[in-house]
Image (tube, rainbow, N blue to C red):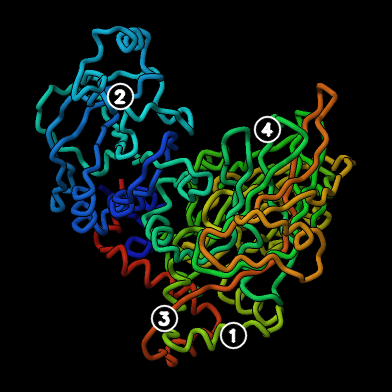
Amino acid sequence: MKPFKNKFARAYISLRLSKAQSVSISIILSLLVLSLSVSCSYYNVNNVATTQEEISRGINKFNQAEKYVILHFDNNVQWHLSKMVINEDQQFIEGVLKPVSGEHVYFSKVYDSRKAQQKSKDSIHKKGGNLKPKDTLQKSVKTRDSKRVHRYNRYYSKPLNEVHFYIKNNKEYKNLQSVSIPLSDITRISVNDKNTGRAIVNVVIGYVATVFLATLLVFALKSSCPFVYVRNGEVIDFVGELYPGTITPNMQKDDYLPMPNFELDGEEYIVKVTNQLKEIQYTDQLQLIAVQHKKDLNVLLDSKGHLQTFQNLEGPKKILFDGELVEATPILKKDQDVYAFNTLKVTESSTREMILEFDKPADIKYAKLYITAKNSVWLDYIFGKFNEQFGSYYKTFQKKQQNIPAEGMNKWLNEQHIPLSVYVKQSDVWVLVERINTVGPMTMRNLVVPIQCNNISGDKLQVKFETGFNFWEVDYVAVDFTDNLSLNQEYIKPSLALDQLGKNVTKLLVDKDEIYLKQPNIGDEVEVYFPVNKVVEEELTQTFFLKNRGYYNYIRDYTGVPDFDSLKSFREKNTFTRFSEQQYFNFVNFDLNTLAYHE
C-alpha cells in the first residue's frame, strides 16, 4: 500500500478503492433476507447485495433457516459448504467442503456425461420410496444463472433453500476439507426464489448496490414508486419504476420509461404495475409509445418526450473524477461496473463531480449524450433517515407538502443536489444543460440529454456530471453527433386494464385527467393490455416506451419527538448532501488513516 503524494493524502480515496470498499462493506446483512421461506415449481436466480455490517445477526438467522450453501469457483467446480461460520476478526467464511447433494444438483446445465448419469438407473437410489440423485462433485459447462427462470421437479430437487456464493479462485480442494475463504474473494451471492411474477427480487442487484436494498425491500420501506413488469412469453420481467420521485400531486410530470424489446407472441404488449411497498400510489395515465426503425439504430425519448436517434455512439477519451484522472474503460460498456459519487475528497458543498471529455468534429451544432444510470440505494436509505427526524409530526408534515407548488419542491431538491446535473463547458465556463430527475435505485435506465454545440469552440466536448454525495451511479456514457432521423411515434392507449380482483379499471388510465387508479395496499396490481402491430419488414425492429404520469405518498408510522432544530437546518442549501456524507462515513466507520493509502 502506498500513500497519496498530494495534498489530498488524508482526504481522498480513489474511485477504484471506493468500489473495493463497497464490496467489503457489503457481505452478509443479506443473509437476513435469505431466511425468507419459498416454495413452488419454478424458481428465479436472483443476485443479492453483500455486506459485512450485520454479519453476526445475519449469519445466525441464516443458519437457523437451514440454507444450503453452494460455492462456485473460477474453475467451474462446485462444493457444498457445511457448518458455515464467519470469522469476523479475520473476515473469512469457514466450513467443511462436501460434494453437492444430488437434490441440489442443477442437472440441465451439467456436461453430457453427467446428463447420461442422470438418465441411467445407476445415478439414482431409493430413499423413503422416492427416487433421489446421488451426491456429486458437479462441474458445469454453464452456470445455473445463464437462464433466469428454471423449472424443477419438486420430488427430485430442492433448489429453493439454496444460497450460491461465487468465489474468485481456482484452487483444488478435497472432500471433507476444512476451508477458510476471505470475504473479499466473494464476488457475488445469489439465491433461488419462487417465480411469482410479482417478486421484487427479480431485479439483479449489483455488488456495488450495498446491503440497503435488501433491507429496505424486506421491510417494504423503500422510498420509491410503482414497480413495472412486462410479460415476455411465460416470464414476467422487471423493467423499472413509474413517475419516480413524484411524491406530491403538484410535482406530476410526464415520464418516459424505456421498455424491453422482444419477439411478441401475439398482438398485445402486456404491462403489470404493482404496489410492493408501504405507500399509496395514484396513477393518472399509462400510454405505450411504439417507434419502428432500422435494427442498427438506437432510439430514446428525452425528458420532454422528443425522439432522439443514435447512429454512431462514441465514448469519452478522458475522465476526471473529483479532479483525479481515472480509468475510462468501465464507462465504455454497460456492465454494472459503475462510477459512484462517493469519494472522500472534501468539497465545500459536499457534492461530487465527474468530467468527461469527448472528441468533437468540426462545425457540429448538435450532440446527444447517451447515459445509463440509476439512483443509489443509499439515497433511498438516507432519505428515510431524514424523514425519521419528523417523528410523530411526519403525517402532519406530509399533509402540508401536498399543497406546496412544484417550483418550491424542485427548488429544494436542486439546492440539495438530488438530481444529476449535466453541464457543458463553453469558453471555460460550465453551463447547466439539464437536471436529470431521480429514476429510482432498482435498475439502470437509459437516458438522453440533447446538447446545443453552437457556443462550444475547439475540437473537444467537455461534459460535467454533478450530484450530492452517493446519490447516483453511472454505468455508461457516450455521445452521438449525427443528425436525428425523422421517425413516426405511435401513441397507443390501453385496450384493457384489470386489477388484482379482476375489476376493469381501463378508463382510469386512458387520459390525463387527474382521475386516478389508486393502489393503497401492498399487493395491489393492475395488468394493462396495449394493442400493437407486429413489424412486417425484415430490416426493421420496434422500440417501446411507457409514458406514465402520477404520484405516490409514503405510509410511515414514525414515533417520538420531532427534532425541529435539526430539521430547520435542512432549509439551507447543501444540508441534505452533507447529511448523506456524514451518515455514510459513520455507517461504514471509515478510518481516514487507513484509507489514505492505496495500491
Give the amino acid at mark 4: Phe
Give the amino acid at mark 3: Tyr
How far separated are the C-alphas under marks 2 and 3? 46 Å
Q: Residue 399 carries which label?
A: 1
Label 4 sits on a secondary structure element that is loop
Residue occupied by mark 3: 558
Of label 4 and label 2, which has the lower sequence position? Answer: 2
Residue at 32% across, 52% down:
30
Q: Which mark is residue 105?
A: 2
How far separated are the C-alphas under marks 1 and 3? 15 Å
Mark 4 packing: few (<14 Cα in 10 Å), some, or many (20+)? few
How far separated are the C-alphas under marks 4 and 2? 31 Å
Would residue 126 appear left or right of 570 to someone viewing this image? left
Residue occupied by mark 4: 262
292 in relation to 275, above or below? above
Of label 1 and label 4, which has the lower sequence position? Answer: 4
